[in-house]
Image: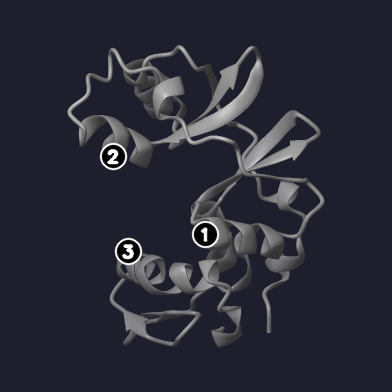
Amino acid sequence: MKPDILSDPVIKHARTDYVVLDENTSVSEAVKTMRDRGVTSVLVSKGGKAVGIVTERDVLYRVVAEGKDPKKVKLGEVKSSPLITISPDRKVSDAIAIMSQRGIRRIVVTEGERVLGVLTTVALAGELVEKSLLPELEEEKGITCPYCGSTFRDAKELSKHIDRVHISEMLRGETGKW
């Protein structure tokens, strides 16, 4: 049985506290902004229009791993573009399928050219567990995985397990297993 969240419109689960920075902003400044705002990505704009996205992983792989100076590299040089978008009324299951097919962890919710929010796989996975599949605590056994029934010592171990095993299943569209 599919959790109800998969039928929800994507806008219901999109983060609306997204950050937009100009393409000429340095990567160093962008990372400071991400840290200060508690986000893991920024939308990149050109002429006031969102044209790309830069994630923490982009910074690690395209700047740090390449030995580039984050104070000199601009967001426009390392952004992923074009943005992969989805309309606000589409279902969460549609967003998951698109993200899985495209190999991305974030999809931008737009109405025309207006950005309404950013939907992330991490947020969706958390909501699936928190809202519709809460694990039961068992004094003797610990915490049981709501997907496969495996038992873990604590919530941290369960979270690691869900990240490693079940999120990848969800992204591949293998929801029939749970």
**Circles 2 and 3: CB distance less than 8 Å?**
no
Picture colour scheme: one colour
Q: Residue lying furthest left in this view?
A: 67
The correct choice, above or below, for 67 with respect to 84 in the image is: above
Task: Report the side of 4 relative to 33 (left or right).
Answer: right
- Residue 176, given in percent of the width and then of the height, sits at 60, 85
Disc 3 vs disc 1: which is toward the camera? 1
Instruction: Report how far apart the C-alphas of labels 3 and 1 lie in the structure.
Output: 13 Å
**Residue lying at 76% horizontally and 29% vertically, measured from the top left:** 113
Q: Which image quadrant for residue 2?
A: bottom right
**Residue at numbered disc 2:** 61
Q: Which mark is residue 156?
A: 3
Amino acid residing under circle 2: Tyr
Instruction: Report how far apart the C-alphas of labels 2 and 3 lie in the structure.
Output: 27 Å
**Residue lying at 60% horizontally and 27% vertically, measured from the top left:** 51
Between discs 2 and 3, the one toward the N terminus: 2
Q: Secondary structure at mark 2?
A: helix
